[in-house]
Image (tube, rainbow, N blue to C red):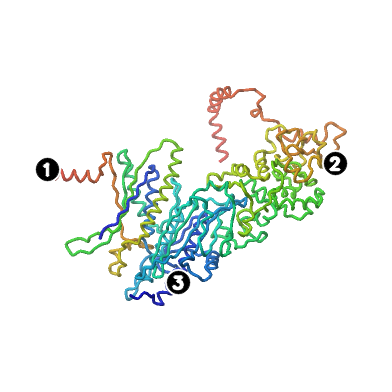
Amino acid sequence: MNCRAEVLEVSVEGRQVEEAALAVLHTVLLHRSTGKFHYKKEGTYSIGTVGTQDVDCDFIDFAYVRVSSEELDRALRKAVGEFKDALRSSGSDGMGQISLEFYQKKKSRWPFSDECIPWELWTIKVNVVNLATEQERQICREKVGEKLCEKIINIVEVMNRHEYLPKMPTQSEVDNVFDTSLKDVQPYLYKISYQITDSLGTSVTTTMRRLIKDTLAL
Amino acid sequence: MDTDLSSQDRKDLDKFIKFFALKTVQVIVQARLGEKICTRSSSSPTGSDWFNLAIKDIPEVTHEAKKALAGQLPAVGRSMCVEISLKTSEGDSMELEIWCLEMNEKCDKEIKVSYTVYNRLSLLLKSLLAITRVTPAYRLSRKQGHEYVILYRIYFGEVQLSGLGEGFQTVRVGTVGTPVGTITLSCAYRINLAFMSTRQFERTPPIMGIIIDHFVDRPYPSSSPMHPCNYRAGEDNGAVYPSVEDSQEVCTTSFSTSPPSQCVFTVTKAHFQTPPPVVTDTLKVPVMGLAFSHQLSSSRLSYQPAALGVGSADMGYPVIFAGGLNAAHPHQLIGPGKEGGVPPAPSQPAHGTQADQERMCTPLDGVHYSAATPSSSEDTETVSNSSEGKCGSPHDLLETIFIRKVGAFVNKPINQVTMANLDIPFAMFAPKNVELEDNDPMVNPPDSPEAESPLQGSLHSEGSSGSSTGNTHDDFVMIDFKPAFSKDDILPMDLGTFYREFQNPPQLSSLSIDIGAQSMAEDLDSLPEKLAVHEKNVKEFDAFVETLQ
């Protein structure tokens, strides 16, 4: 199937990167998480309850709702933290993107490994700006808050198109569709990756790939 | 194709829609309570969590929603609407958002009710959770409190968007197709909050006539501050705004701003509520005074009567004392009123504790909403802002009070410190200029030309009864200090004079401009030397600090 891809762009200050990314990722995952499945006989299942909680941002005039799952929050924070560190340690450009991909696993026969087939991809392009005065920062707080409000509305709009979603799996297939490792909620299988764009405009990964290819070609 | 739903499916669908509507209302109202919501995820399903989402049910909200629905379901032409509005402490209100749950005719016959529709409704609720934090009203609701509160109203029928002002925006939360129609959830919200100040307040009762004014307030859920609809003043308001209980009578402005004033007014109000003997015994206030204050209380000058009621027995509230308001002459209402006449509207209790009907008769044109945006809810500024354009002198008085309130020992010449400003007990008896003795209302009732009618006198009192003070800017009457059991006509130095002279400590030399006549530059120049001296004594200072810890 085709993978649905959505791109969101934000321009933020360095200290706002984490919160902005978390806000978007949590909002997407709120819509892409269900309660834990409990399979019963005859192929029926019941679904647990998803709790929610409000999160206030410290560096942005913004608040969002996330799933009440500390495990999920930790996982996202870890990924976003790595992204932020990579952004910071990269060149002065401060551009990068972090992606949240939902995929399905397709079991393949040996010796081939399982395939991961993405069905939805959310990309957040982050542009880090440096501000000089406190007043600019204050304005930035509000502006980024407003921008994030627009992003949330965009996300909700996409979610409510009710486009492709994986079929509800049987008990044996549930791990191919959902991430069942969390104890309180069950998001669709997802992975988070990021790319930092260096000042030349090329991504670091592509540069590395080219280097390796060049080396091998020798 | 069988276009009819099975009866089971139909029943299920109706149930889903009904509970979806109830949960929608819960989500919206809870998002406007002003608090962060937190519910727990649970891996084991409980039968009561509709749509697999942990959304608490506030009983009153469910009750109101059910009443509004009255057994019906949203259908074509019959939408369920939740109106979110803001109401200031002065009684002005404004619609902020209308959330609409509508049904249209576009049917999706092939969709599975028990599975797909249910899951999509669950997704829509999640979207609603997200979107309710994104509209401007969310931030306003998080900051509600003293200056304003957020109210909700549920109605069923046609959507009324006229109250949102011009240029309102809409956001669609989402749609879910069902075999009987497509459910759409959307929000129309006001974007231009600046219009609040010039808004012509005209309300029409809702079609269904169901008016719910809930005191959507903190601290839910620990207590139950939600008030039943059709609130009437005098009913027990619970813990939230105790002073509002007696609201009808006094001091709607008591909540307008900063904590000091609020505290003062609240206590004053409490006193106001005490029976007349409190007043009459101490100051021999004619009962008429109290009656007069009642009369005034129906106007926007409401906190002046509060002052009356207190009398001089409670001098701890100098703000109220606004000089001369000793209860002996309640007519002598002093206030820098700029306008005459009493605004026609009855005073409204703060925070929308009245039923909506009473909202209709709230003032007034040109009333400013002081808490238009979070940034404008600064304490004193709010008062000042709100006083502009208001036709009520109370706010001017309030403003004056704030500006002029000084402590008992502030370095000001005594004749600039009015009774209102002295934050001391028995301020009534604090010294004033000797010249004012003749104008002591306790000794000589004011002549009628000074105050023709009580109200007129109060409203036009700029300098009238205050003229005797000789302070042009002072709007309060100086009361002669008449200590009990003393005679001040025999000896030059009597108890009164003694008290006056030695009441305040001498001026601090550093605060006196005359002494030393050091200029700022000289001060700055001498700083390095002072610093050097202090540095030498650093060890002593450190030792001193350690003794404090």
The amino acid at mark 1 is Leu
Instruction: Say which residue appears at 83% left-offset and 34% top-offset.
Output: B494
Spot occupied by residue A217 in the image (x, y as percentages of width and height): 12, 44
| Quarter of the N terminus of chain A within the rendering | bottom left
Report whether A130 appears left or right of B246.
left
Residue B276 visible in the snapshot? yes
Mark 1 vs mark 2: in front:
1
Q: Are marks 3 and 2 on the same chain?
A: yes
Q: Is residue B172 left or right of residue B416?
A: left
Disc 3 crowd rating (10 Å Cα; few below 14, some 14-19, many 20+) is: few
Q: Toward the viewer: B114 or B409? A: B114
Whole-number angstrom distance, CA of label 3 to CA of label 2: 81 Å
Q: Nearer the viewer, residue A163 or B401?
A: A163
Whole-percent x, y for residue B168 in the image: 48, 52
As displayed, is residue B339 above or below residue B529?
below
Q: Name the residue carrying label 1.
A: A218
The disc at residue A150 is: none
Same chain check for tags 1 and 2: no
How many angstroms separate mark 1 from mark 2 (CA)?
114 Å
Which mark is in front, 3 or 2? 3
Q: Which residue in the rendered view is the most extreme toward the bottom? A: B7
Q: Is there a contact, CB below 8 Å, between mark 3 and mark 1?
A: no
Quick one: SS at disc 3? helix
What subunit carries mark 3?
B
Give amino acid for label 2: Phe
Quickly name the residue at label 3.
Answer: B15
Q: Chain of mark 1?
A: A
Where in the figure is residue B468, as x and y percent of width and height? 78, 35
Mark identifier at residue B485 = 2
Residue farthest toward the right in the current orientation of the protein: B490
Q: Earlier in the sequence, mark 3 or mark 2?
A: 3
Q: Is residue B491 left or right of residue B311?
A: right
